[in-house]
Image: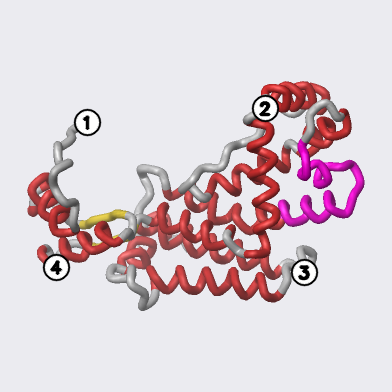
């Protein structure tokens, strides 16, 4: 790993721009990709201003992660995620809880445990929700046995209760709504991912989420449906419309169109 001692320097956008040009070399630069915090986004713009032939691209993985963040922060999922966090924390911080859940895993033939939720990787909320859903029979067995106290969260894991039914339904809706974005994010983390893949997976993600929202069996409230569509429209406009990240928006469509594997489509 090649690093540079720069603790005494101010890491402004101008500093980042100059450092990148000096390190990589002007003749080798065709595109710049980064997340879209203040300095990193500005340094991308400064780079393309100095080298106009470069493409200015946001980090699509970070962008989709923030899209998931917008969805999971909706008021509709606040209680569900609060219960998730509380239950995961109780089991992970208790030796007795861990042991009881392990016993229940054996009884219920479950081979996967609970997943932790990361602080900034918002896709882990969906992964944790899926793991919790998979562990529901084991957690119910722990509550039924009564050796480990889940406190106020126990009522959501009774064998038969309104609170249990409501929680399980909302957990399922959270997973269904977040899974398309998580799948797209995972695929686009690949080293082989191209700008054409970004175009295809982003639009596939939007289509899949809209299919979930339009499913009459899921009965999403109108307000939630409108909020999610608003998030998707806003995020889409940022990259593919007239938003503040769309300076190279035509590159994605061109990449998809020029991909030889798409010639038959």
Say left or right for 234 vs 145.
left
Query: Marks 2 and 3, how far apart in space?
Result: 41 Å
Select label 3 or label 4 by which is in front: 4
Q: Residue furthest bottom?
A: 242
Q: Which residues are magenta?
A: 150-172
Give the colour scheme of this rendering: secondary structure
Mark with earlier residue (2, 3): 2
- In the depicted view, which residue is nearer to us: 63 or 204? 63
Tag 4 residue = 49
The residue positioned 67% from the left and 30% from the top of the image is 112
Residue 169: x and y in percent read 78, 55
Query: Marks 3 and 1, how far apart in space?
Result: 53 Å
Tag 1 residue = 1
Say left or right for 123 vs 27.
right
Q: Quadrant of the N terminus?
A: top left
Number of residues whose C-alpha sits closer than 10 Å to that of mark 3, classed few (under 14), some (14–19) or many (20 or more): few
Residue 54: x and y in percent read 18, 62
Residue 163: x and y in percent read 84, 53
Our reading of the magenta stretch's main secondary structure is helix
Mark with earlier residue (3, 1): 1
Select label 4 or label 2 by which is in front: 2
Q: Tag 1, which secondary structure? A: loop
Query: Marks 4 and 2, how far apart in space?
Result: 55 Å
The numbered mark at residue 94 is: 2
Tag 3 residue = 216
Query: Marks 1 and 2, how far apart in space?
Result: 39 Å
């Amino acid at each position: 790993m090649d690093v540079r001692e720069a603790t005494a320097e101010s890491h402004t956008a101008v500093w980042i721009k100059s450092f990148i040009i000096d390190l990589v070399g002007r003749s080798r630069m065709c595109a710049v990709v980064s997340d879209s915090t203040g300095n990193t986004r500005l340094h991308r713009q400064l780079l393309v201003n100095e080298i106009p032939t470069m493409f200015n691209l946001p980090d699509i993985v970070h962008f989709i992660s923030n899209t998931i963040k917008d969805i999971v922060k909706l008021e509709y999922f606040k209680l569900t995620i609060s219960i998730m966090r509380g239950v995961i924390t109780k089991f992970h911080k208790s030796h007795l809880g861990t042991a009881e859940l392990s016993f229940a895993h054996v009884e219920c033939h479950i081979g996967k445990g609970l997943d932790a939720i990361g602080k900034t990787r918002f896709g882990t909320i969906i992964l944790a929700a899926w793991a919790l859903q998979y562990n529901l029979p084991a957690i119910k067995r722990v509550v039924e046995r009564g050796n480990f106290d889940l406190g106020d969260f126990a009522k959501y894991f009774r064998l038969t209760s309104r609170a249990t039914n409501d929680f399980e339904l909302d957990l399922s809706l959270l997973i269904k709504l977040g899974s398309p974005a998580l799948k797209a994010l995972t695929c686009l983390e690949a080293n082989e991912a191209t700008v054409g893949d970004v175009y295809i997976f982003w639009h596939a993600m939007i289509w899949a989420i809209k299919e979930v929202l339009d499913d009459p069996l899921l009965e999403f409230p109108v307000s939630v449906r409108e909020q999610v569509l608003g998030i998707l429209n806003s995020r889409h406009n940022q990259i593919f419309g007239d938003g503040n990240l769309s300076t190279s928006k035509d590159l994605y469509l061109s990449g998809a169109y020029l991909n030889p594997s798409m010639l038959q489509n």
